[in-house]
């Protein structure tokens, strides 16, 4: 029997199956995280490029990796919410400086993951808005 008649793909599959069966008999899978729980199977997109992106996002999500764009936008949103809760003008300037610094970082990342730049906040406009809220 020559090597040209051996189905290597079948042989590799059978070898893998045999090793999995042996490991199961030896109890090597008994202490895995999530044992006995249903597997969360998300449907794979049909296109190959979409599948690659799906796998990349899944790996990032499973490892709690947050892209810089998302992290910066969330921080900016949180600081803007704090800005709208101000009841005093004294923390206004440092808060605006922090927001505008993050806006600058976001707008100069050089990526195109999230489209649309965020405009920096104008200190005079924000001071007027704060004064109007405090006057009410």
Image (cartoon, rainbow, N blue to C red):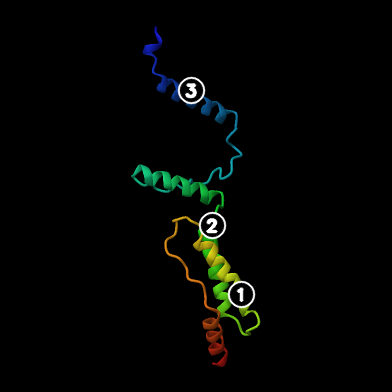
From the image, tell me which residue sits under label 1: 95
Quadrant assignment for the C terminus: bottom right
Q: How crowded is mark 1: few (under 14 residues within 10 Å), some or many (20 or more)?
A: some
Name the side, left or right, on which 99 lies relative to 42.
Answer: right
Give the mark nearer the N terminus: 2 vs 1.
2
Would residue 44 be seen by someone viewing this image from the given angle? no
Residue 79 disc label: none
The residue shown at (48%, 56%) is 110
Instruction: Give whichever of 59, 43 is nearer the camera.
Output: 59
Count of numbered labels shown in the rendering: 3
The residue shown at (57%, 72%) is 79
User: For residue 126, which quarter of the picture?
Assistant: bottom right
Element under disc 3: helix
Give the mark nearer the N terminus: 2 vs 3.
3
In the displayed structure, 117 sits above or below 36; it is below
Give the mark nearer the N terminus: 1 vs 3.
3
- Which one is in front in this view, the residue at disc 2 or the one at disc 3? 2
- Which one is in front in this view, the residue at disc 1 or the one at disc 3? 1
CB contact under 8 Å: marks 2 and 1: no
The span from disc 2 to disc 3 (Cα, nearest Å) is: 43 Å
The residue shown at (39%, 8%) is 2
From the image, tell me which residue sits under label 2: 68
Name the side, left or right, on which 11 lies relative to 79.
Answer: left
From the image, tell me which residue sits under label 3: 15
Element under disc 2: helix
The span from disc 1 to disc 3 (Cα, nearest Å) is: 62 Å
Image location (x, y in percent) of residue 27: 60, 32
User: For residue 123, which quarter of the picture?
Assistant: bottom right
Image location (x, y in percent) of residue 92: 61, 79
């Amino acid at each position: 029997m020559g090597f040209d008649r051996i189905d290597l793909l079948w042989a590799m599959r059978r070898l893998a199956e045999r090793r999995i069966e042996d490991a199961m008999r030896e109890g090597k899978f008994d202490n895995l995280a999530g044992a006995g729980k249903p597997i969360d199977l998300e449907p794979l997109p049909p296109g190959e490029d979409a599948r690659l992106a799906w796998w990349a996002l899944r790996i990032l999500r499973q490892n709690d990796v947050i892209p810089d764009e998302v992290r910066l936008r969330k921080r900016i949103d949180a600081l803007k919410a704090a800005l709208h809760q101000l009841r005093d003008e004294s923390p206004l300037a440092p808060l605006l400086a922090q927001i505008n610094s993050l806006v600058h970082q976001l707008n100069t990342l050089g990526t195109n993951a999230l489209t649309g730049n965020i405009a920096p906040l104008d200190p005079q406009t924000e001071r007027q808005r704060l004064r109007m809220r405090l006057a009410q």
